[in-house]
Image: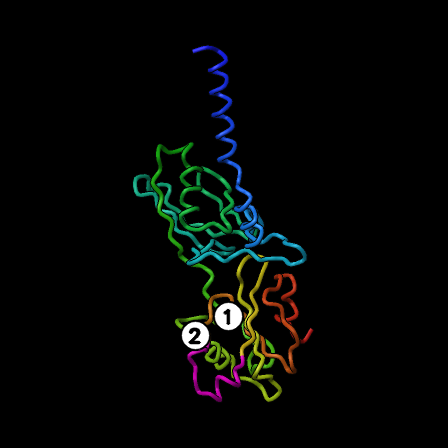
Amino acid sequence: MSKKAILLILSMVLWATTLCASPLPEEQKAIASNGISRSIDNTAPGSVRGDVRQPPLQRRNPRYQVCKSDVLDLDFPFTPEFNQTVTVQPDGYITLRAVGDLHVEGQTVPELTQALRTAYGTTLHDPVITVALKDFDKPYFIASGQVAHPGKFDLRGDTTVTQGLAIAGGLTDTAKYSQVLLFRRVSSDWYEVRKINVKHLMQARDLNEDLHLQPDDLLFVPTSTVGKIKRFTPSYGMGVYYNPYR
């Protein structure tokens, strides 16, 4: 086969490939008429899209994270001389035998276990360590505003909004029953805000819509009509609800 023939065949192959890869005019018209967009939205949770800030999504079934003043039992089954009980200091560190200080605040128990194995890896060969929470921050909710006994209460078992208000002594005569606010943390920087019509719940005697409280929830009962409340609010703006009389 001559060189000219080979070049002609290659040119035809390249032309056919380009034709197949390009959309036909009819296809282009269909895409335009249907408004199909192939752009990818790379806006990550917690970032800014236009003028609206989106809070990050809350993790499903989150693990407990170590907090200040937590007491931890560290058990070394094969080297019991390293067994110890430590308390998380106000700066988030613990002091370990033969290792020194280690920052642990905000870690889950599995993460802390791995961090301890890494820390003791220079002293022990392939250390086996078991971490147990001996004393930790108990689940709680806060009731504020027009309740008889505002404050922080232990959250024991399933507790609904109306039950939580009853635990706080019930609502006062000046309370706005129809606009009780529930603030629920969705991240370290954001709270989700829900407006609950407790008056409707009680009049209808249908408590199926009575939300169950979660740890760290805040109930705020206002004295007058609350205006427009954003669905999400940053945590730095929560002071007014924790201390409504300021």
Going from the N terminus, do you reach mark 1 or mark 2 first? 1
Residue hosting label 2: 159
Residue 148: x percent and y percent? Answer: 56, 83
Q: Amino acid at mark 2?
A: Thr
Instruction: Using a 10 Å C-alpha cutoff, classify the residue at mark 2 as few (fewer than 14 neighbours), some (14 to 19) or many (20 or more).
Output: some
Q: Is residue 215 left or right of residue 244?
A: left
Asked if the residue at tag 2 contacts the one at tag 1, i.e. Cβ–Cβ closer than 8 Å, the answer is yes
Three-letter residue code for mark 1: Phe
The stretch drawn in magenta includes residue 198: yes
Q: In the rendered image, which quarter contains the N terminus?
A: top left
Which residues are the magenta region?
Answer: 197-210
Whether residue 5 can be seen here: yes
* Residue wearing tag 1: 141
CA gap between label 1 and label 2 equals 10 Å
- The image shows residue 15 at horizontal and vertical percentages of 51, 28
Front residue of 20/1: it is: 1
